[in-house]
Image (tube, rainbow, N blue to C red):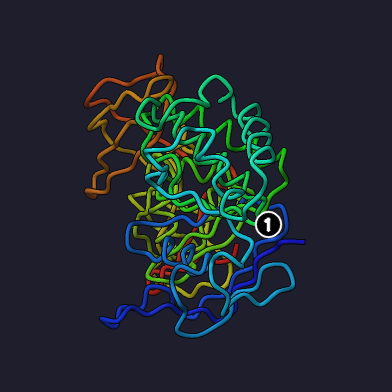
Amino acid sequence: MAGIDVTGLSTVYPNGVRAVDALDLRVTDGELFALLGPSGCGKTTLLRTIAGLEPPATGTVAIGSRDVTALPPGRRGVAMVFQDYALFPHMTVAENIAYPLRVRRAPKERQREAAADVARGLSLSALLDRRPGQLSGGQQQRAALGRAVAAGADVLLLDEPLSNLDARLRLEARTFLKRLQHDLALTTVFVTHDQAEALALADRIAVMEAGRIRQLGTPREVFQRPGDTFVANFIGSTPMNLVDGRVRDGRVECAGARLPCPPGLAEGTPVVVGVRPEYLSVADDGITGRVAAVENLGVSSLVTLDCPDGTLISLTVPEQDEPALGRSLTVTAAPGRLLFYDAQDGRLLDG
């Protein structure tokens, strides 16, 4: 078993910045786990602390049943792929892949066999004699992954491994990486600021901000029911609509409409109403506004409505149903898709 247990972990830099703040986390054996968040939220520092590249101020890191907090990186059973791949420019692809075995003084024949085996699985067999400067970005990424796989580690750590690829290569690499991790059944933690990448790849996601985990769950849980307004704002290729509302006479008044009210809220309670643009559709009753903008997203369009009180509401429509600018539209949410957040602390309200 090679799960990861992080308990009470804090990482503090010499200037006093607390990059990871008393964090608890468990990654199960064989899981593909994403650390997601904006730049500066502590996700890369957490990854480097698990790897042993950053010393923790407090707390422990365990891999499998071993406490590795005090162990150097080479004795933790981890392999890491960096954002810039960190391939040795003077070595061939075969030599880069076999480097972990070379460090362990494995026989040269074993090194050649391992490089050939790994290269076959990564479609690199024809490139084994090339150097990194002769490879494309996608090929370099596969070579870096090959080196990590050849290391025979218990845990694979990936620091934004796809960020240097163009859009088309990134899509191909996502599919490849998911299949590779599934075939290897290797516990994998990857850092990304790209929420689409995290939603597509991960078994579970930890959304981080300011060194803490704001929400932990499956991609579906995090997308459909963000735990607070920070996560709601961050997750989704089109931002969630977050609109101020107030409880009046057993309903929530919001953008000129009266919406169902969560149970237990007192008269006059301020709330934030959340609904994703994908879950809104044109209807006879609901929130009404005039079309202020239409953005082409390919197979769909993002329509922005300007409501009478100045609130802006977005929804997606099929490309063939784009409304004309200035047209009046009424929209309503799909059943069960309205979310309500506490206006004070931003947390999701039950019901």
Q: Is residue 334 visible?
A: no
From the top left corner, tell me how far across and down residue 210 is, in percent: 37, 70
Q: Residue at 41% of width from left, 71% of height from top? A: 211
Q: 143 and 199: which one is in front? A: 143
In the depicted structure, whether residue 271 falls above or below residue 181: below
For the residue carrying disc 1, how many other residues have a C-alpha within 10 Å: few (<14), some (14-19), or many (20+)? many
Q: Badge 1 is on which residue?
A: 154
In the depicted structure, whether residue 231 falls above or below residue 139: below
Q: 111 and 303: which one is in front? A: 111
Kindly indicate the quadrant of the structure image that contains residue 239: top left
- Give the mark count: 1
Q: 198 and 259: which one is in front? A: 198
In the depicted structure, whether residue 207 falls above or below residue 331: below
Q: Residue at 37% of width from left, 64% of height from top? A: 41
Kindly indicate the quadrant of the structure image that contains residue 325: top left
Q: 123 and 8: which one is in front? A: 123
From the top left corner, tell me how far across and down residue 30 is, in percent: 71, 52
From the top left corner, tell me how far across and down residue 83 is, in percent: 40, 47
Q: Is residue 260 visible?
A: yes
Kindly indicate the quadrant of the structure image that contains residue 73: bottom right
In the picture as drawn, the residue positioned furthest to the bottom comes out as: 58
Amino acid of disc 1: Asp
